[in-house]
């Protein structure tokens, strides 16, 4: 967890209600870390000769995945397969793989004649006569008299850049809940380091609170303390670049969209799910966070995305999407006392996703879908504890050719049915050619695997092996041309003997 990621987590242990506390800490020199009696503290220099110690409450990382024994007869990954050249038109991909088209370069805010410094030392343009903040003592806050109520809008260029603080909603119990905070103007709130957006603090109520940073650099280098928000849309170029955002108890199906060039570059965002006071955790449910979309050029470059689950429910992130180069240098961090899972990840074809934290994309999966031509070719993956009903499907030409997959079921995996069923389908031409799948089960619940090869050359030279309470019922092929030289646990696929 980075220093910038945890600054907001310190507010509860300092003076969160004082509007200058956040600004003072953020304007201080970068803190140093120190340990006292084994506990981690940040040491802030707040004035010459004056320092402040702030304790850091660190989340508990999830247990590492179990260790599995190697196959009894180790099988080396098959040799990489050269992409098949075809004169036919390439089939459309299941998901977009290229980032959205880059836009013309956007100049960073620069001092100009008549410009003045903002409340946090940032450069702000001389405000127009209609700007909401004309000086560094001004502020923007929603009130009951606002039209519409429970909303704020910094709609024009530099509109709120000079603001001392910006607030929508109230943090107090029963206070008004912000519904919409929009920053549509270019540089609308550039560099403002005291923005507070409070939605409904109880996600179970299903209320929606959206923050939209639509202008170029509109929310760049800001610091936001938020609660109960359901959407953060960074849809202007560089709109959330360098921002630090803390989200306490995000709303159900929270989404983060980084939709254009550098929209979330070097953004540090922390989502913390807390346990309601005086509540005992029984019968854990599922709390869903929706999609994290990094689709613009360099949109999530250097992003730090952190989820801390200290609540009662299991947290599941529905989808994380990275396109070509959009997540370079990013990290995804998972902390807390309760489990966090990722339902699916969308990666570009044939690109190694060496992004810290995204290995979680391959545990507790419901589906592993390779629906684009050569999209999962020559991969080497380990899938941990797929759920009952797990389906792996390779449905386009060479989509999984030459890949090696180890499917591992741990003793700790929880299954309620008497048998766990998995399905592997190879339905594209040469989709699983030369593929190796090894399934090992350390769980007391038996695993049954059904495999279907139904296209020309779909499973030629494929190898399926299983160990420890796993039954591969059969590999179904209509003709020998669909599974030539294919074997499962030493038997010929589809009953066709090897030639």
Image: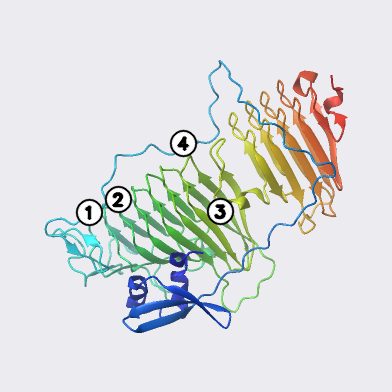
Residue 136 percent location from the top left of the image: 21, 70
Can residue 253 be seen here? The reply is no
Residue 294 seen by the camera: yes
Q: Earlier in the sequence, mark 4 or mark 3?
A: 4
Query: Is tag 2's residue or tag 4's residue first in the polypeptide sequence?
Result: 4
Front of the two marks 2 and 4? 4
Of mark 2 and mark 3, the one earlier in the sequence is 2
Q: x and y percent of residue 292 in the render?
A: 50, 50
Estimate the spatial distance between the alpha carbons at disc 2 and disc 4, rounded to whole Å.
23 Å
Of pointers 2 and 1, the one earlier in the residue sequence: 1
Say what secondary structure mark 1 lies in: loop
Q: Which residue is mark 3?
A: 356
Report the residue at 54% width, 48% height from top. Answer: 320
Depth check, mark 2 against mark 3: the one in front is 3
In percent of width and height, residue 134 lies at 17, 65
Separation (CA) of disc 2 from disc 1: 8 Å
Residue 215's label in the rendered image is 2
Q: Are marks 2 and 1 in contact (CB under 8 Å)?
A: yes
Residue found 28% across the figure and 45% down from its top: 106
**Mark found first going from the N terminus, 1 or 3:** 1
Give the mark, 1 or 4, whose residue is nearer the N terminus.
4
Query: Residue beneath label 4, please?
Result: 98
Q: Secondary structure at mark 2?
A: loop
Choose top left, top right, bottom left or bottom right for residue 372. top right
Query: What is the spatial separation of the Cα atoms under label 2 and label 3, in whole angstroms?
Result: 30 Å
Report which residue position mark 1 lands on.
157
Mark 2: give few (<14), some (14-19) or many (20+) Cα within 10 Å: many
- Residue 195: x and y in percent read 34, 66
The local secondary structure at tag 4 comes to loop
- Are the residues at dot 1 and dot 3 in contact (C-beta closer than 8 Å)? no
Above-or-below relation of 377 to 173: above
- Calculate the distance from the C-alpha at mark 4 to the C-alpha at mark 3: 21 Å
């Amino acid at each position: 967890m980075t220093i910038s990621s945890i600054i907001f987590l310190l507010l509860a242990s300092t003076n969160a209600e004082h509007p200058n506390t956040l600004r003072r800490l953020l304007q201080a020199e970068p803190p140093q870390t120190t340990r006292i009696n084994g506990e981690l503290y940040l040491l802030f220099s707040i004035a010459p000769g004056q320092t402040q110690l702030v304790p850091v409450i660190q989340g508990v990382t999830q247990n590492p995945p179990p260790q599995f024994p190697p196959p009894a007869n180790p099988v080396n990954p098959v040799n990489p397969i050269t992409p098949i050249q075809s004169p036919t038109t390439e089939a459309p991909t299941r998901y977009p793989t290229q980032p959205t088209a880059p836009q013309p370069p956007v100049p960073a805010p620069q001092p100009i004649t008549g410009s003045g410094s903002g409340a946090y030392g940032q450069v702000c343009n001389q405000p127009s006569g209609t700007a909401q903040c004309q000086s560094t003592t001004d502020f923007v806050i929603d009130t009951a008299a606002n039209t519409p109520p429970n909303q704020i809008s910094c709609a024009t260029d530099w509109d709120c850049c000079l603001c001392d603080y910006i607030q929508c909603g109230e943090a107090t119990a029963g206070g008004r809940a912000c519904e919409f905070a929009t920053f549509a103007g270019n540089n609308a709130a550039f560099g403002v380091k005291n923005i507070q957006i409070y939605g409904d603090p109880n996600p179970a109520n299903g209320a929606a609170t959206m923050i939209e940073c639509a202008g170029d650099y509109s929310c760049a280098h800001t610091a936001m303390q938020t609660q109960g928000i359901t959407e953060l849309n960074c849809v202007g170029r560089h709109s959330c670049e360098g921002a630090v955002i803390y989200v306490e108890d995000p709303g159900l199906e929270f989404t983060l969209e980084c939709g254009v060039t550098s929209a979330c570059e070097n953004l540090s965002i922390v989502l913390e799910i807390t346990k309601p006071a005086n509540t005992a955790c029984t019968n854990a449910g599922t709390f869903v966070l929706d999609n994290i979309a990094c689709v613009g050029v360099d949109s999530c470059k250097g992003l730090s995305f952190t989820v801390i689950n200290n609540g009662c429910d299991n947290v599941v992130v529905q989808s994380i999407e990275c396109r070509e180069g959009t997540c370079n240098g990013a990290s995804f961090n998972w902390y807390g006392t309760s489990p966090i899972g990722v339902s699916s990840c969308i990666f570009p074809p044939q690109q190694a996703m060496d992004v810290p934290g995204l290995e979680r994309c391959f545990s507790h999966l419901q589906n592993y879908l390779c629906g684009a031509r050569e999209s999962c070719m020559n991969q080497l993956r380990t899938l941990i504890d797929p759920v009952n009903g797990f389906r792996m499907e390779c449905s386009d030409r060479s989509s999984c050719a030459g890949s090696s997959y180890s499917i591992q079921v741990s003793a700790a995996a929880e299954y309620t049915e008497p048998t766990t069923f998995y399905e592997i389908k190879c339905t594209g031409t040469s989709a699983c050619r030369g593929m190796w799948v090894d399934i090992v089960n350390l769980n007391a619940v038996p695993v049954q695997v059904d495999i279907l090869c139904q296209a020309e050359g779909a499973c030629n030279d494929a190898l399926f092996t299983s160990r420890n309470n796993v039954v591969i019922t059969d590999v179904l092929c209509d003709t020998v041309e669909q599974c030539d030289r294919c074997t499962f646990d030493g038997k010929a696929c589809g009953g066709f003997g090897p030639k």
